[in-house]
Amino acid sequence: MLSHSKNSSGQFILALDQGTSSSRAMVFNHRGEVVAQAQKALTQHFPQPGWVEHDALEIWQSQLSVAQAVIDQMGSTDSIITLGITNQRETTLIWNRKTGQPIHRALVWQDRRTAPECQRLRSAGYAEMIQAKTGLVLDAYFSASKVAWLLDNVAGAREMAEAGELAFGTIDSWLLWNLTRGEQHSSHLLSVHATDVSNASRTMLWNIHNGQWDDELLQLFRIPPSLLPEVRPSSGEFGPARQLGGIPIMGIAGDQQAAAFGQACWQPGMVKNTYGTGCFLLCNTGPQPVSSQHNLLSSTAWKLSSASQNPMQYCLEGSVFMAGAIIQWLRDELGIISQANDVETLAGSVSDNGGVMLVPAYTGLGAPYWDASARGTLLGLTRGSNKGHIARAALEGIAHQVCDVLYAMSADLSAQSDTDILELRVDGGASQNNLLLQTQANLLQIPVVRPQITETTALGAAYLAGLAAGFWQSQNELTQFWKVDRRFEPETGSESWRRRERERWAIAVEKSRGWG
């Protein structure tokens, strides 16, 4: 896919958005509008049940090709003043410093092969220490156990790592290494090996309190420090993109943090939710991490520069495993819709769910339950139940899961500060579904707000790079570009409906657990 439109401002920002299913490149003008974009699908590899891999060279080549495509559309790199990177987080890669070749396919964040090792560490009593240092739940989701698996299962990898011959990185580091690659030195390529604070905080090896790689965690996972990238602020100098005409790289952030930045969630209590395959909710908690008592994750959101007046910013995060994927299931497995956007019409053909409740725990339940044994559950069917009721229950199942996470966030915030959550800012493909967002507002009893520009992940990377480059002078300047497309207020009289449906949802969730 490729599109382009001219703008008279004369200067632009390039954002590279490397995701789980595709690599994209987008060019933004000074008003934060997309003026050029290209996208290329990424091959998914499933060598065994529960294993998910990507070809790292395909990631690099696909990202390079879409970047070159949008540059061609712009005519040259002359008008592109800087470049920002955002990426699928936690996905783990190790490569040879001298040759630049990966030692194995990348282990994707969805990969579960290290779950038994994580369970062993939990049983040994390490979970509390890991969460205290990293803000993360001990789980195969994160990078640490994946790095250990690669070192233990790729022939010669551990010996090479201990000799300083290998480099570890999440996908941002891999792209940065390749973009900045220069001439060959005797023992290594001239490349920048770095990451930013947001990606480092998702490895389960980085202490979010002191902003350092943690020696105790490195010893626990048996990872040599020489593998690790340098950790830098999210907005600042990372080096020249030599493979793209030397464009300065000045912004890096993991995709969900970048989306929150693109949504202008810059004050404590501001929350964004990305409705994608799953849902990812991030709540800004300010310059101090909040320790969750409700099974949420505490991560670094971003750091704008090394200057003392720009302290690290933190966030609470909750992940919902199944959101847009539920709509795909209705289309591909049940066949009750022919395309994804048909679900709103079908769900709107009935006035309510007719007593039907769908808990979409097809791959277990994410936050705040973290229950891998839960399974999808469809309850309340009668002879009068029809496709419309199931479609409506599916949309409500997405909205209920978001409520579970947001209520947990609100409880964590209120326990440690006087910050309130006043609205939910939304983006992602399913955020175009008006019925879903109205249902969400009714269940939450707070406004749900959809912006005009919903490409917030790439936009966040562009903002971070543009601030460092002086393209924009401050976050205050960026605030004027965030404009509302539609604001969904809770409907009058929906509070009693909310109480009833939330009670029924809690019962349905309990019935879904323990099946796996």
Image: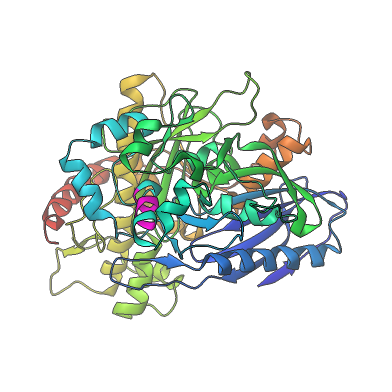
Residue 367 position, x and y percent, is 29, 45
| Quarter of the picture holding the N terminus | bottom right
Q: Can I make out residue 494 in this image?
A: no
Question: What is the basis of the colouring in this image?
Answer: rainbow
The magenta span reads: 145-150
Task: Indicate the quadrant containing the C terminus: top left, top right, bottom left or bottom right.
Answer: bottom left
Q: Is residue 421 left or right of residue 468?
A: left
Question: To which quarter of the image does residue 405 belong?
Answer: top left
Taking the spot 39% from the left edge, 54% from the top edge, the residue there is 151
164 part of magenta stretch? no
Viewer-proximal residue, 402 or 101? 101
* Mark count: 0
Closer to the camera, 455 or 387?
455
Direction from residue 60 to residue 323 in the image, left or right: left
Q: Position of residue 290 (x, y in %)?
A: 38, 26
Residue at the (43%, 73%) spot, across then down:
342
Task: Classify residue 97 by image quadrant.
Answer: bottom right
Q: Horizontal and vertical percent for residue 316?
A: 40, 35
Q: Main secondary structure of the magenta part?
A: helix
Give coordinates of residue 487: x percent, y percent: 52, 45
Tell me, yes or no, whether the highlighted magenta stretch contains residue 146.
yes
Q: Is residue 498 above or below residue 48?
A: above
Q: Quadrant of residue 69?
A: bottom right
Which is more toward the observer, 219 or 433?
219
Residue 40 can be seen, yes or no: yes
